[in-house]
Image (cartoon, rainbow, N blue to C red):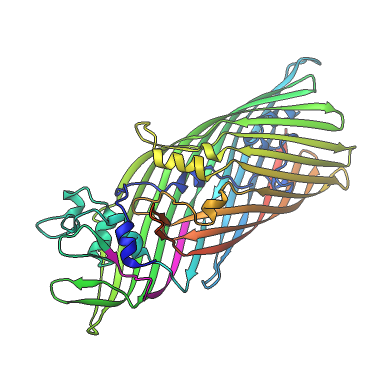
Amino acid sequence: MKRRAIAAACIMLAVSATAQNALDAYNVSFNQIKGSSRYVAMGGAFCALGGDISTLSQNPAGIGIYRSSEFSLTMGGQWNHNASKGAETATNSVFTFDNTGIVGTFFTGRHKGLISYNVGLTYNRHVSYNRTFRGANNRLGSSFTNYLECVTNGIPSTDLVVTKEFDAYYQTSSPWLSILGYQSYLISPMSDGSSAYYGLFDPSKSIGSSINTIYEDGRNDEYTINFGGNISDRIYFGVALGIRDLSITRNVLYQESLLGTTGYYDDGNVAGKISGSDFDYSTYYSMRGTGVNGKFGLIARAADFLRLGFAVHTPVYYNITQTMDASVYYRHTLTNGVSASSSQIVPQIVSNRVKIQTPWSFQAGAAYIIGKKGILSAEYQYVAYNRMKMKENNGDPFPVENEFYKTRFRAGNNIKVGLEYRVTNAFSLRAGYAIQLSPVKADLRNVNGEVPVSGLQTAYMLPGNASYYSCGIGYRFSAFNIDMAYQHFYQKSDLFGYSPLFYADGTTLIPGSSEIKSKQNAITVTLGVRF
């Protein structure tokens, strides 16, 4: 892969200052296994069980199992550990308030037909984004500056200039990322006024390393309003309205250190060829918004020892406000030995409004009641990730992103298994396991496809399978109960600083990636009272 071959093959991409990252839709569609301690301890396998506050946001029919009113509260802590070869391990801990709710049970006085109906209000934290990821590449095959040259080719260099008399940010339609890269000398025009560029990194002679760090904070919370009932102690039904409250803040620091570079520096005072460079590309990004969806579920008592459950969730329809900004700090070394350093910042925080539609999902489960001593429960969930959609605020679809979901994602398959054994009438032991299979297709994971990461935020992660191992205990006395759960989460993901690029003539730009091994240990305690 030669630098000039890349420059000749690259075409101008459709990017703008406020364009979105296609992986945003997946990030708001994915749910962790969180909820009450009993729910967590049994791996979330409650589709056919019910009778737990957490099930109201999973299978609403679970509310029909209640024979008394209940209030419960869940809190705890989680410890995150994200490691990658060659990079410093990122760790953090956070207090969690994952679940609370109240259910009211009302009897009709009948022994057949509608025996009782129930109403409930719940709060559930589906995802906690308080985490840090860090990956490193010690032998680069390409550079972020090569990506910049590709997205900038076709734009006259006169449209990237920022002076007192002319400001490209406001007086042209040029992508802000290209302007930022040009002003930081990460790319240079082939000649004066040229619309073809070259980056600092020449694969035939340059060497370099990179560090990519992502700091995330935020949450995806859901409030549900539930109604359900009990028909003849055989069929339990429920419907729910879910209201989502989303807030994600992401700070990304992408750093490269390069030697044997090819570039030119001229700030009016110092000029010369660039022989080496260290630069930091920093971006700030936030998503805040609300969403709404509907849920419907059934649980059937097929026999005294067997329950069957089914639930369907409509997509969550989000209205989201995005804000972002970016900056570059560079330290260039010139061939004459002079060093030049400065920073470039986009002139203002930019804002954009989009709509995201998460996938439909379907759940089915079965629970085997082992006399009065135990429960064995299993659940399968189908999530149509390839049906995610992203739209402009006026409702017009983003065709590139939506086609990306159809062709690069497949449906997700989640499996949950839970076990509860009642040691005494008051004391129970629990265990569970769950796996959420990655919806990312192999060609994308093997870096055989591009990712729409236009705009200022170029970093993204491709998730692997997520596994949950859990156990817990429960104690019930009179109308009160206390439950504790421990959960271990494990997932491998691939972290990229920018998208690969592919061209009809066979020329490619392949970024380095870092495998992130994520572990999370969580402990929760639930306090409940029935009345």
Which one is in front, 308 or 369?
Answer: 308
Q: Is residue 66 left or right of residue 195?
A: right
Dominant SS in magenta: strand
Q: Position of residue 18 (x, y in %)?
A: 32, 47
Task: Write the residue at 25% across / 82% down.
Answer: 335
Which one is in front, 94 or 202?
Answer: 202
Furthest-right residue in view? Answer: 371
Q: Is residue 498 left or right of residue 184?
A: right
| Residue 482 sits above or below residue 9 on the image | above
Does residue 213 belong to the magenta stretch? yes
Does residue 11 belong to the magenta stretch? no
Which one is in front, 248 or 63?
Answer: 248
Q: Position of residue 34 (x, y in %)?
A: 63, 46
Quarter of the rendering containing residue 242: top right
Furthest-front residue in view? Answer: 505
Task: Write the residue at 56% across / 62% down.
Answer: 516
Task: Write the residue at 54% across / 52% down.
Answer: 443
Q: How many marks?
A: 0
| Placement of the N terminus among the 4 image quadrants | bottom left
Q: Position of residue 48 (x, y in %)?
A: 75, 34
Q: Which residues are magenta?
A: 198-216
| Placement of the C terminus among the 4 image quadrants | top right
Which one is in front, 352 or 208?
Answer: 208
Q: Is residue 43 left or right of residue 409?
A: right
Residue 289 seen? no
